[in-house]
Image (spheres, rainbow, N blue to C red):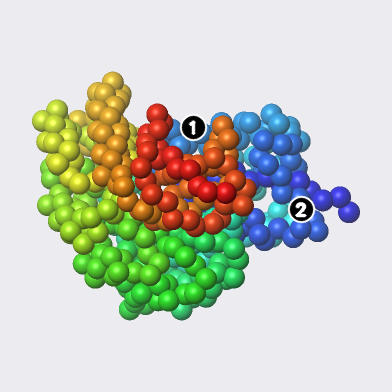
Amino acid sequence: MNKKKIAFHTFGCKLNFSETSSIAKQFPEDEFETVDFKESADIYVIHTCSVTAIAEKKCRAAIRQAARRNPNAAISVMGCYSQLKPDELAHMDGVKWVLGNAEKFKLADIIKNECFDETNQVVDQSEIASSTTFVSSYSIDDRTRSFLKVQDGCDYACTYCTIPFARGRSRSDTVNGTIEKAKLIAATNVREVVLTGVNIGDFGRHQNESFFDLVKALDEVEGIDRYRISSIEPNLLTDQIMQFVSTSKRFTPHFHIPLQAGSDKILSLMRRRYARSLFEERINRIKEIMPHACIAADVIVGFPGETEENFLDEYRFIERLDISYLHVFTYSSRPGTKAAEMGGHLSNHVKEERSRKLHLLSDEKKESFYQSNIGRTVNVLWESDVDKGMMSGFSENYIRVKTPHRPYLVNQITAVTLDHIDEDGLFIVSLNS
């Protein structure tokens, strides 16, 4: 029997990547051959994102690319974009299956059992809205790290966000269930695990457990060198968690904390669950107990009603924070959200100019953070990618370091002293052979 060639392509968050990896493992190797998305395949699987209009545009472009690569291929589209706008995707050339977030884990069975005659939409809006089922997943495509899904969905109602519509209510695995998955990862050669979810600080709430309970338990799993917390809301980042990470055997001093707006007025319009003073308190506390911790912050620029005064207030607030870099997102109106109905929407020109200024501020923050680490000895986990004869890796506090390529270093952790920043703004080190 000839194997069907199947190719996967993932957009969006680390959560999507962990789920794609688990879904791909459901296709038996005696029936399917996994090929690169850039190759000709019988089946293309595109895991979509709908966080912005640009994300949706990229998903549509990938569908068109797959259809051109093999006009006879069957294309499966799944994920958040599929959940929110299934009809829009179903009418694109080559699309055979459109699956929502509740149904995508049945993809292998659907493909193995369905004929190729007509488009099959499997999207149940009511099912995702009421779902209490948590489907665990983790990636093992990368020798160096694994994305471990510990939570899904969100009970928050931020006015700009479609995630509650796309992924449903907050739900998670149990501590014991997550530990079992971590032990499976530990049995591989993966050195680092990134904890992922939509709102991971909400872990365990419906089982009378907490994210802190999970962190403590994971820290005891042998065989995993590092954990990173992918993103955690400032109101859920407790002093307990910060204190534990500061003395942890395995959790790295690297935090990704969504700010979204540096103006209390805009935070209120967004219906965020904190004031900026709480965010500042969290940053100061981390730096007090972990002076060299890396702290990233998400910021949405150009939210409806954001005046020039609001923006300048936000800029000055972020400027004084001891953070390491920013993830800057330009506000994108999402149909069905409260923000889309608000007045005061800004022109693209204004949003782009404000975004540019925050990107420059982020560059300054990152350069300052790197400079503050000169002379320190850190532990770098080396990755397999090679660029111009150089390989790179990340320290525990997420500083990127590069060195001349040596294959035997891949997936190894070595101590290096940070003493030289090159023209690309990265630390470069020489290691003894």
Whole-percent x, y for residue 201 in the image:
32, 63
Secondary structure of the residue carrying tag 1 is helix
Q: Nearer the viewer, residue 328 or 194?
A: 194
Whole-percent x, y for residue 95 in the image:
64, 39
Q: Residue furthest right?
A: 1
Q: Is residue 127 above or below residue 321?
A: below
Query: From mark 1 to mark 2, how far is it between C-alphas?
Result: 29 Å
Number of the label disc, if any, that sits on residue 32: 2
Q: Residue at x 14, y 28 (%)?
A: 308
Which dot, 1 or 2, sits closer to the camera?
A: 2
Secondary structure of the residue carrying tag 2 is strand
The amino acid type, in three-letter code, at marker 2 is Phe
Marks 1 and 2 in Cβ contact (< 8 Å): no
Whole-percent x, y for residue 200 in the image:
36, 62
Q: Is residue 389 above or below residue 248?
A: above
Of mark 1 and mark 2, the one earlier in the sequence is 2
* Mark 2, other Cα within 10 Å: few <14 / some 14–19 / many ≥20: some
Residue indicated by mark 1: 57
Q: Residue at x 68, y 45 (%)?
A: 7
Whole-percent x, y for residue 325 in the image:
30, 42
Q: Residue at x 47, y 72 (%)?
A: 178
Does 400 sit left or right of 122 as displayed? Answer: left
- The image quadrant where one finds the N terminus is bottom right
Q: Residue at x 30, y 69 (%)?
A: 247
Q: Is residue 348 above or below residue 252?
A: above
Residue 184 placement: quadrant: bottom right
Residue 427 placement: quadrant: top left
Q: Nearer the viewer, residue 338 or 290?
A: 290
